[in-house]
Image (cartoon, rainbow, N blue to C red):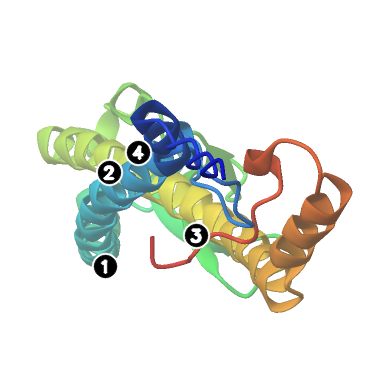
Amino acid sequence: MTPSSPAHPQSKRTKRYKKSKKQPTAKAEQPSFIRKAKRDANVVVEHYADQITTSRRGLDMMREMLLENHNAILSCADLLNRSQPPMAGKIEVRWWKSDGGDMTRPVVVQWGSNGRTKYISYKGLRRKCNSRGKFELNLEQTKNLLTALEELLTAREYVLKKLKSLAQAMTKTERHYAALLDFNERGWFDETYKQIAENNRNDDPLATHGPPNKSE
């Protein structure tokens, strides 16, 4: 009786091959650029978080500056009223209502020969000062007050423009954030992952993995 032939032993090379062969899974490892982007996102958030903290301090400073600026303009207005005679050529500060609002803003006016006042730009106020007749009495003080008033109004305009830009940026941010919340609440991203995985089930495993783990 011829003994049966022993089973051919499986080679070590074949075993090593089978052991090292990776089977595709439903959720394959994410591409390296995705993993790197997640790490970079934390760095970006921390960077801008510091800037936001600085911006909050700047916002508090601008609010205090506007209050101090307003009080200083009031002082200039009072002193200009005292340093000049009540006649044509006198420069004053008035508060006019903004168009379509209840807020007032300081403007510079000058008395005319007909007893009426006209609006003048606050740029170059010192050169617009009347220096004749009774205006000579406090001429130096009046010129210094007009120089200070120009600086105060320039600073006020600058800060208000910055605050307006910030308010517009916050409005846009709120709108974009609402859209982002809508995406997440509807589960749009997770649903899209599932649809792509279903469409590409027999294709590249990297294209068929499910939604990523949010904690990664």
Q: Is mark 4 on a helix, strand or loop?
A: helix
Image spot of residue 114 (x, y percent): 62, 44
Which amino acid type corresponds to the residue marked 4 in the rendered image? Thr
Q: Which of the numbered marks, if any, corresponds to residue 154?
A: 4
Which amino acid type corresponds to the residue marked 2 in the rendered image? Leu
Query: Tag 3 or tag 4, which sits nearer the N-term?
Result: 3
Which residue was labeled with disc 3?
Answer: 105
Query: Tag 1 or tag 2, which sits nearer the N-term?
Result: 1
Q: Which residue is drawn at 71% across and 36% down?
A: 204
Tell me where residue 75 sits by quadrant: bottom left
Q: Which of the numbered marks, if any, corresponds to residue 149?
A: 2
Query: Tag 2 or tag 3, which sits nearer the N-term?
Result: 3
Query: Tag 2 or tag 4, which sits nearer the N-term?
Result: 2
* Mark 4: few/some/many CA within 10 Å (<14, 14-19, 20+): few
Rendered position, 184 above or below 160: below
Which residue was labeled with disc 1?
Answer: 67
Q: Nearer the viewer, residue 64 or 71?
A: 64
